[in-house]
Amino acid sequence: MSKGHLIALRRLQENLGEFDYLTTVDIKVCSCIETSTTYNQGYSGRKEYILSEKAISFLIGHPLVFRENSPTTRVENVKGEPE
């Protein structure tokens, strides 16, 4: 297993076909990428790419989720109710 790849959300949204190694679940998560445009003092807008909250539900049980600041530490996502 490799340490993974950093891929911009924009590339995943616009060029998903480039990534033939994505799993079915990865593709479902990518379907949750949303864009919003922000404007800076009336100048041209800048698109921001974010994952919607719905993406979290697709990551439940996904075996390849890791901490950003500790890429060898797995994160287990389990379904539960707020406490």
Image: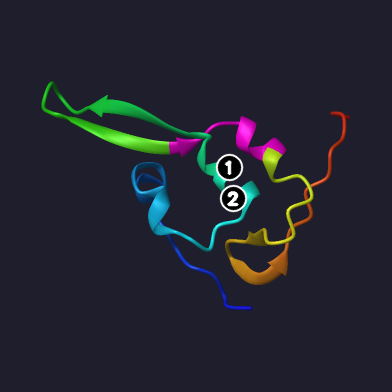
Q: Position of residue 26 (x, y in %)?
A: 59, 50
- Seen at 35% across and 27% down, the residue is 36
Residue tagged 2: 26
**Magenta stretch in the rendered image:** 50-57
Q: Is residue 67 left or right of residue 19?
A: right
Most extreme residue toward the left, as rendered? 43
Asked which quadrant contains residue 67, the reply is bottom right
**Looking at the rendering, in which quadrant would you find the N terminus?**
bottom right
Residue 43 percent coordinates (x, y): 11, 26
The reply to whether callout 1 and callout 2 are in contact (CB within 8 Å) is: yes
Give the CA separation, mark 1 to mark 2: 5 Å
* Nearer-the-camera pick, 26 or 57: 26
Q: Compare residues 66 and 39 and report the one nearer the observer.
A: 66
Residue at which label 1 appears? 29
Amino acid beneath label 1 = Val
- Which residue type carries mark 2? Asp
> Vertically, is 43 above or below 9?
above
User: Residue at 87% across / 35% down in the picture?
Assistant: 80
Q: Is residue 29 above or below residue 66?
A: above
Is 56 in the magenta? Answer: yes
In the image, residue 45 above or below residue 16 = above
- Quadrant containing the C terminus is top right
